[in-house]
Amino acid sequence: MGSVLHFRRNKGHLNDEEQKLFAALEAVRNDVDPIERVRRDPVQFAHRFRDPHDQELVGLLAASLAFGNVTTILAKVESILAILGPSPTTACDNRGPIQKALAHIRHRVFRGDDMARLLFGARSLQRSSGTLGRAFVKHLDEGGTLREGLARWASDIRARGGLPSIETRSAVGDLRGGKHILPNVQAGGASKRLLLYLRWMIRPADGIDLGLWAVSPSRLVLPLDTHLHKIARNLGLTDRADASWRTAEKITERLLRFDPDDPIKYDFALCHLGMLQRCPSRRDPKRCEGCPLMPYCKHWRPSRKRSLAPGKVGVPL
Ligand code: SF4
């Protein structure tokens, strides 16, 4: 066992290209100032509370609204927390008052009523299981896979909160926000917001993620969005053209080669690099200037034909 760990820590199983990509990912990760970047990330709201019940409930709200312009998201979550007060869990114990208090709120397709149902449903599950994390572990054990466990856990919250079920036709007017506030992980989309929430709750506490839930980070799947998908393609982590659940799984499989215990530890840094760099996904000297991934990016390499298939030795960078 010791020699396996030694082997993995020394990355002796990586080919030359993977070794260089590993160095690039580490450099990007080490370059991020977590304190500074957390201030620009919705995970900050979970850190604001001491009680883990508040942290997981507020985290779910923030992750569920993490859709669109980050400044707008931060302002919206801030305004909802001002309504919920110092103890969001207590505020969400009763459906009526929370529905009334949030009735005037809107964020993209989500109405205050959708948010109230989400919070009430999650709080109900939290109360009956002790924590949302314990409920997740139970559903994960029953479901077997992360995807199935997550689908069951989300359905439980939907049912308790009175949100429309995933079978509801999405085009039905006011039901649209209620249906999408918790993505349907079985539908094929990347379900980025739910996977982001899992990252916050499950990855070890490192100033960014909180490490609240007793689930191995090795089971996590990358929360993939269009920015991260572009960067992953540029790095040769995937050739797939769709930002789907399957693509997220495939990229995660590649990342497992760099750290089998914590494959998505690069997510925060890469995501913020995507936000800062506004990756054009083409050879653009002005916009690419200063991007730490430039030596590894397919748009700046001598040959643009390869992806980094595990175990294959690539053309030197
Ligand atoms: S070098 Fe340019 S195209 Fe490549 S990842 Fe960086 S910003 Fe994107």
Image (spheres, rainbow, N blue to C red):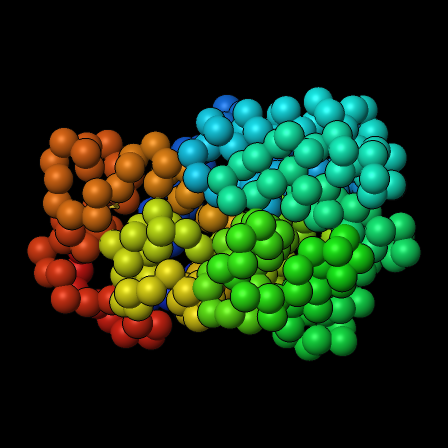
Ligand 1 found in image quarter: top left
Q: Position of residue 69 (x, y in %)?
A: 43, 34
Pick out the residue farthest to the front: 173
Name the side, left or right, on which 196 lies relative to 70: right
Q: Residue at x 75, y 68 (%)?
A: 139
Question: Across the whole image, how many numbered discs are drawn on residues?
Answer: 0
Quarter residue 154 falls in = bottom right
Please state, as top left, top right, bottom left or bottom right, where the N terminus lies in the image. bottom right
Please state, as top left, top right, bottom left or bottom right, where the C terminus lies in the image. bottom left
Q: Position of residue 11 (x, y in %)?
A: 44, 61
Q: Residue at x 75, y 38 (%)?
A: 99
Quarter residue 133 falls in = bottom right
Pick out the residue farthest to the left: 302
Q: State whether residue 284 is above or below residue 298.
A: above
Q: Position of residue 100 (x, y in %)?
A: 76, 33
User: In this view of the protein, can residue 33 be seen by the observer?
Assistant: no
Q: Residue at x 65, y 38 (%)?
A: 112
Q: State whether residue 38 is above or below residue 93.
A: above
Q: Residue at x 66, y 60 (%)?
A: 164
